[in-house]
Amino acid sequence: MNVCRKMSVLTVVALGLGACSDLAETKVQPLLEANNDNYTLVWNDEFDGNAIDETRWQYRLDCKHWSKQQQSNNVVADGYYTILLKKERVECPNNTWLQPGQKEGDEPARVVHYTGGGVISKSLFRYGFYEARLKTPVGAGWHSSFWMMKYLEKPENSDSLKFNPLDDPSLHSHIELDPFENDSIDPTHFQTDAHQWKPEPGTEDKGRKQNKVGTKQIRFNDGTTLTEFHVYGMEFTKTHVRYYFDGKLVSETEFPASRYKHNDVNIWLTGLGTFLGNTQAIDDSKLPEQITVDYVRFFKKNN
């Protein structure tokens, strides 16, 4: 599938963003049912090296819910990026999330028994087409995601999302785009949506501190499972967000800049022990497991 598998040299193209020269020369396009060569590849990672390319990625390092995200759990080999998902006890002094087996009112354990990982692009993006080919882990309890939001620095001594940079009163209106979120308990389902965090007072959803737009549950009953490779795509424009699965449009929502104050975003690939809704605890019998990513690409639409 990865047409750049043999290439290890990345060339710099428009806006100083990297793209594989073979892909640029072949004018690779997003996987779309109707695509008339309307796009130009301007940034990508085909994971053809033997380590994370730290010129284009930084690591997600935090404790959230049931896992600590660790640098060592991010591996590149044989043309793929894998996020290793393990059972191991790690201290998280600032982590106040309840762990599996605990109930409301229990004292925070301040340790987790699982580790995950993730990477965040160093480049920022806005309008265009985002695409990744990946497969999810087997066994309950893991949250896999390919999503976009501007990375906001945390204090060096903070290893927990208890400190939320969005609580900074000087920050306003940050968007989040979610072309793919999956809870591994159900390999036949994923969710898409868009958020505006910290909107102007009086413009937020009733009873919330954000605006959440176009949430859709994508479900399959034809034998499709997300534990096999699939291509997830998203077109982001000044007026709409469109979500694609293996080249087919599965969801579309209005998300106008005039209303939701668009900003530049980073690309995130993450795997952690947590959930979107109700789920059981992590299935230890399936561990270790992994999320496997073939490639990530960003395209600009031609004028």
Image (cartoon, rainbow, N blue to C red):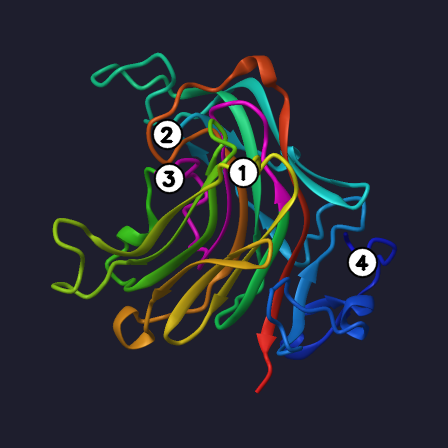
Q: Secondary structure at mark 4?
A: loop
Mark-to-mark CA distance, 4 and 1:
28 Å
Above/below status of 301 relative to 182: below
The amino acid pointed to by label 1 is Asp
- Is there CB contact under 8 Å for labels 3 and 2? no
Q: Secondary structure at mark 3?
A: loop
Which quadrant would residue 228 be assigned to in this image?
Answer: top right
Residues rendered magenta in the picture: 134-161
| Nearer to me, 157 or 128 | 128
**First of labels 4, 1 by sequence position:** 4
The label number, if any, that marks residue 161 in the structure image: 3
The amino acid pointed to by label 4 is Val
Disc nearest the viewer among 1 and 2? 1
Q: Is residue 148 magenta?
A: yes
Mark-to-mark CA distance, 4 and 2:
44 Å
Residue at image x 52%, y 33%? 187
The amino acid pointed to by label 2 is Asn
Which quadrant would residue 13 be assigned to in this image?
Answer: bottom right
Q: Secondary structure at mark 1?
A: loop
**First of labels 1, 3 by sequence position:** 3
| Nearer to me, 138 or 109 | 138
Q: Which residue is mark 4?
A: 3
Mark-to-mark CA distance, 4 and 3:
38 Å
